[in-house]
Image (cartoon, coloured by chain):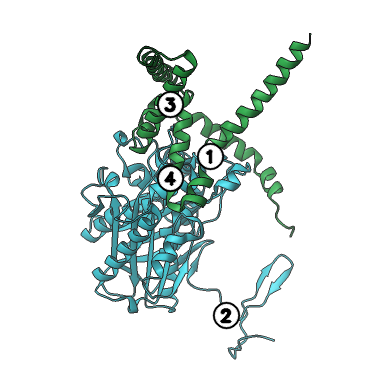
Chain colours: A cyan, B green
Amino acid sequence: MRLFDFGIELDINLTKGNKTIKRTKPKNAKQIGKQTIIFPNEPKIFSTHSIVSQKEKDGPFAGYFKDVLKDTKFNEKTFEKAETKMFVYALHNAITNAGITNKDIDVLFSGDLLAQIVSASYCARLFDVPFMGIYGACSTMAEGLIFSAMTIDGGFAEIAACVTGSHYATAERQYRGPLELGAQKQKYSQHTVTAAAAAIVGLVKEGIKITKATIGKVEDYGITDPANMGAAMAPSAMGTLVQFFIDTDTKPDDYDLIATGDLGKLGSDLLRQLMDEKGYHLGQNYMDCGAAIYDHEQYTSEGGSGCGCGASVLDAYILNKMNKGEYKKVIFAATGALLSTIITQQGESMPSVTHLVLLEK
Amino acid sequence: MQMPSGEKFKQQNKERNDKYTQYVELVSPKQSTWKSLSSAFWIGGLICVLGQVFFDLARLMFKVSEDKASTIALIILIFLTALLTGIGIFDKIAYYGGGGSFLPITGFANAISSAAVEFKAEGLIFGLSSKFYTIAGPVIVNGILSSFIVGIIYFIIGLF
C-alpha cells in the first residue's frame, strides 16, 4: 500500500544492491550530484549584524567590524551570561536593521560551543520565536544558513533567522583551563574568537542570494591532539570543497572568493596541499577567516577559531564586500572540529565536518 | 551490509591516517627547545633569587631560624603569585617562562588561585571549593605517590 496516491504509476524506482525501493515521487530536482542542493526560489540574506571584542577589532578587519565590546563581560556578572547577551545583541540588531519584528520570524536556528548549547537557548527564550538548536561546532553559521535556506525554499517558513557566536573565556574554560593559569600553549593552537553574528534570511527582493549548498560528511584523519584543530579540519574542508566542485562541475577559479571558517594558518596550508593532490588548485581567491582575523603580533599562534570566527567575518567583511559589488560569487565553507574534552582524553581522534554555502549577489 | 564499527573504520583508514598524521607532525610549528630552556632558566632562576632575597631579609630583619625564614620566603612568594594571578599578569610571565615559572612554588600557587578566580562564578561551595584543586590536584596526588615510593626505597636501603 502506498502512503500517498498521486493517481499515476511512476516508473522511478530506485535500485540499491539487490533491493528495489518503490518511490512515490520522482527524484527531488533540488538535489544535484551527491551532496549538493540548489535553492531555485533564491532565499536571500537581507540583514546581518555582528559584535566582536576589542582583540578582533585590533586585527586586520578593524575597518569592517562596527560594534565592539569594550568590556569582555558586557556588563554581566559572568562570561557565559556575556556570551548570551552578545547573541541577543546581534540578533536584536539584525531584526531591527531588517525593519521587521520578532513576530515576523518563523523559525530561529542557533547554536554555540558551550555544552547543551546554552547561549543559543538562553538567547531564544527572550525572542518568543520557534527555535531549533543546532550544533556544528565552528561550522554552525553555515549549518544555520543551510537550514534557513532549506526551510524557506521548501515553503515551510517565510523568514528565518540564524545566530551564532563564541567567547574566548567560556571556550577556554570548557575546553582547556582557567584563564589566568600560566600554561604555555602549543605553537599550533588557535585562539577562540569573541564574537557573535546573526543573519536574517527570507524571500525578499534585495539581498545576497543563497543559491547552492553542500552538506558535509564527517571526516576523521586520525589527529588526536585537541590543540591541532586546523590539521583535523583540513581534510573535511577538502572533502566538502571537492564534492562541491564535482557536483557543480566548476573549478576554484570560477569564484571571486573561497572562504573557509577557521582552519588557521597551518590548516589552510594543509588544505591547499590536500586540494592540489585532488587536482584543484586554490589560488589568490582563497582566504581563511581564522588565519586572517588576527595579526601576527597578537600572539594567537595559528589564528582564530570558534563559531564567531567565520560568522563575524562573513557578516562584517564578506557580505559587506558583496553588497558593495566587489564580490559576485562567494563560497563560504565553515569548518567545525567535533570534539569534546572527555572523548579526546579517552584517546579518540577528532572528527570534523564542513558545510558549504554558495552566496551570490 | 555490515554494521559499521569504529575499530574497522580505523583499520581501513590506517594507512591514510598514518601518512597524514606523520606529515602534520612534520609541518606543525614547534617550540624551539633551546629558546624555551633559556627563558625557563632565567625566569626560574630569577624567582629563586627572589626567594633567596626574602629568605635573607627575613633572617636579618626578624632574626629567626632558617626553618622559619624559609617559611616566610615561601609565604611571600605564594602571596605575590596569587596577587599577580588575580590582576592578570602571571599568565604573561608564564607564557614566556614556561617550566621556569611553573616548577617553583609559584606554579602551584598560580594553579590554585587561577582556578579560584575562574570558578567563583558558580558559587562558593560547588564552584570555588570543588574546583579549587582541578589543576593542582594531580600535583598533590602524584607528589604523595612519588614520596611514598621514594620512602619505601629508603626504607629498603636502610635495612642493609
- SS under mark 2: loop
Residue A189 appears in the rendering: no
Q: Which residue is mark 1?
A: B133
Three-letter code, disc 3: Ile
* Residue that badge 3 annotates: B75
Name the disc covering residue B118, or none.
Answer: 4
Q: Are marks 2 and 4 in contact (CB under 8 Å)?
A: no
Q: Nearest to the eye among marks 2 and 4: give it.
A: 4
Q: Earlier in the sequence, mark 4 or mark 1?
A: 4
Q: A353 or A235: nearer the eye?
A: A353
Q: Secondary structure beneath disc 4?
A: helix
Q: Earlier in the sequence, mark 4 or mark 3?
A: 3
Task: Name the residue: 73% across, 70% down.
Answer: A19
Instruction: Report whether B141 appears left or right of A175.
Output: right
Q: Marks 3/1: CA distance?
A: 19 Å
- Counting from the top left corner in percent of width and height, residue B159 is at 78, 11
Q: Amino acid at mark 4?
A: Glu
Q: Secondary structure at mark 1?
A: loop
Mark nearer the N terminus (3 vs 1): 3
